[in-house]
Image: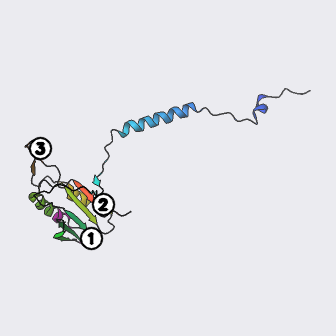
């Protein structure tokens, strides 16, 4: 006598379809959590601009522009000013690895005293710098220390405003792809 075939024998060729609803629910909750938590995380970045060239002529200013350029070479940091660039100061390395960043900062403070309204500096690294060194140089250009003198500039309304940065706008002058 033959036995009635079981359901297991009938299902042997077919695979059951997985239930994707719980997986989709968990992925949705995970994505929602990431989006919500990303808005609370402060992302640290150093703002820098790409050089901008324009064919428009600008009105003549009575003051000569500072045109501050900081060139980083293998052995020194050069501070250049003016449109025909003139060398203002050479800052030699302290040792084969470290640049003299305190002298750089002091030199930039002296320039800021002469040109308090100037906010832009052009950074031209001529060598491949380690990331940490580049960030340290950029911080010396941008940030005012607590021990630095305060700088004030008049805003559009004529009120004096305290500056929070030394040269806040850093532009890379020789970007290579």
Tell me the mark number nearer the camera, choosing from 1 and 2.
1
Q: Position of residue 27 (x, y in %)?
A: 50, 36
Task: Tell me the element at label 2.
Answer: helix
Q: Residue at x 11, y 47 (%)?
A: 162
**How many C-alpha atoms fall within 10 Å of the one at disc 1: few (<14), some, or many (≥20)?**
some
Q: Which residue is mark 2?
A: 132
Q: Which residue is mark 3?
A: 156
| 16 to the left or right of 105 | right
Q: Residue at x 9, y 49 (%)?
A: 152
Q: In the image, which disc is placed on residue 73?
A: 1
Is 54 contained in the magenta span? no
Task: Tell me the element at label 3.
Answer: loop
Gap between marks 1 and 2 measured at Cα = 16 Å
Gap between marks 3 and 2 measured at Cα = 38 Å
Colour convention of the picture: rainbow
Q: Quarter of the image holding residue 63?
A: bottom left
- Dot 1 and dot 3 residues touching (CB under 8 Å): no
Label whose residue precedes the other's in the sequence (1 or 2): 1
Tell me the mark number nearer the camera, choosing from 1 and 3.
3
Foreground pick, 88 / 165: 88
Q: For the magenta stretch, what is the residue range?
A: 95-104
**How many C-alpha atoms fall within 10 Å of the one at disc 3: few (<14), some, or many (≥20)?**
few
Quarter of the picture containing the N terminus is top right
Quarter of the picture containing the C terminus is bottom left
Q: Residue at x 24, y 55 (%)?
A: 56
Label whose residue precedes the other's in the sequence (1 or 3): 1
Task: Tell me the element at label 1.
Answer: loop
């Amino acid at each position: 006598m033959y036995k009635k075939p079981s359901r297991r024998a009938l299902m042997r060729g077919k695979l059951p379809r997985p239930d994707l609803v719980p997986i989709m629910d968990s992925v949705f909750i995970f994505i929602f959590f990431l989006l919500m938590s990303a808005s609370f995380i402060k992302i640290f970045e150093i703002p820098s601009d790409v050089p901008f060239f324009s064919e428009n002529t600008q009105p003549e200013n009575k003051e000569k522009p500072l045109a501050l350029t900081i060139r980083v070479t293998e052995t020194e940091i050069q501070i250049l000013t003016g449109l025909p660039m003139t060398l203002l100061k050479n800052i030699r390395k302290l040792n084969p690895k470290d640049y003299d960043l305190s002298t750089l900062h002091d030199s930039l403070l002296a320039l800021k005293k002469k040109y308090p309204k100037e906010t832009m500096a052009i950074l031209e690294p001529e060598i491949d710098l380690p990331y940490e060194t580049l960030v340290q140089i950029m911080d010396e250009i941008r940030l005012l220390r607590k021990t630095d003198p305060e700088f004030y500039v008049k805003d559009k309304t004529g009120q004096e405003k305290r500056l929070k940065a030394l040269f806040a706008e850093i532009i890379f002058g020789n970007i290579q792809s």
